[in-house]
Amino acid sequence: MDLGVVINIYEETEFTGAFEEARAAGFSHGQVNSFLPRITAEEVRLLALAARGVGFHIDAVGCYINPLRLEDAGMHGVDFVDWKTLVETMVVMNGCERIVCWSGTLGKSLATPNLLNQEEESFNSVFVALHGMLEHVRGLPVQVLLEPFTAHVLCDGKTCARMARKFPFGDVRIVLDAPNVVTHKEYSHRDQRVREFVSDVALNVGLIHLKDMARDDNDHRRFPRAGAGVLDYGSYLRSIVTQCPDVPMLIEHATSVKEMIAAREFVEGVAKELGI
């Protein structure tokens, strides 16, 4: 199983060092998330050079903006200006065409619920925002990947699939990240919920994130690296490989070499037991 990894780039991150750590953990490809406010074309070029210098292939770029609040950088320090810089220049990253963002929320933060997110008007507003984003890159080989979340407009497999179908040419696809869509109330039925989500979105998947889920001491959901939670990973992987297209599968939420190795070895071990 050819696993990749998600790398986060912050203002204090040493570019080459970040890719060297991924390589040391046994990864040669993955997603690079930029949390650099007002990233420049030169910084994109330097990221590309750093990755290329250690033999790391960039499958996707993450710029986690909110499509319903394109000018608001409050969630992760980046906004539509940063997205435009990345999407216009990411081709220097070994021809990368995928860019990941959230699916849109009217909440004040990533996990803040807002009942308006489930209104038809909000769904349509996300569609309009995505159409505008694609118009900005018309003629460029770009695929926008939407990452769902329980508190967002795309909160389950059905809303994800419905949105993707509105873009029949494949320029909008879904990030398969099942733990993101398991609500607090569904936690006890998480494995069934995960399987249902995979089935719902399988035909519209453009990228796969592999992480786990658990509860903290205050009974809140948390998302540790694969193998450090309670998901039935055998069931999860079996659902993915039997239903989803051949897209990059990336370890997420592993922030050190030790954690990256542990997550990779765990997933590879489960896959070996399943014969996949």
Image (spheres, helix red, strand yellow):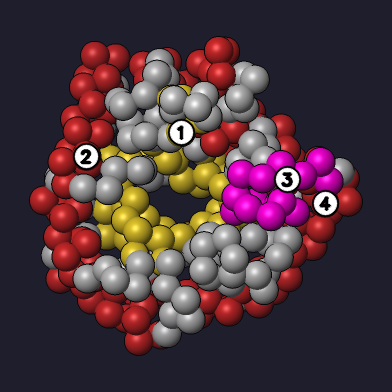
Which residue is labeled 1 in the image?
222
- Whichever of labels 2 and 1 marks the residue nearer the N terminus, that label is 1
Q: In which quarter of the image is the N terminus?
A: top left
- Whichever of labels 4 and 2 marks the residue nearer the N terminus, that label is 4
Q: In this view, does 85 lie to the left or right of 246?
A: right
Residue at left offset 59%, top offset 32%: 181
Is 115 covered by the magenta stretch? Answer: yes
Task: Tell me if I can see residue 248 in this picture.
Answer: yes
Which residue is labeled 4 in the image?
122
Report x, y in % for residue 150.
64, 36
Which residue is labeled 2 in the image?
259
- Whichever of labels 3 and 1 marks the residue nearer the N terminus, that label is 3
Q: What's the residue type where badge 1 is placed?
A: Arg
By secondary structure, the bulk of the magenta-drawn segment is best described as loop
Q: What stretch is highlighted in magenta?
A: 102-116
Report x, y in % for residue 198.
55, 27
The reply to whether discs 3 and 4 touch (Cβ–Cβ < 8 Å) is yes
Query: On the image, which quarter does residue 208 sit in?
Result: top left
Distance (Cα) linking label 3 and label 4: 7 Å
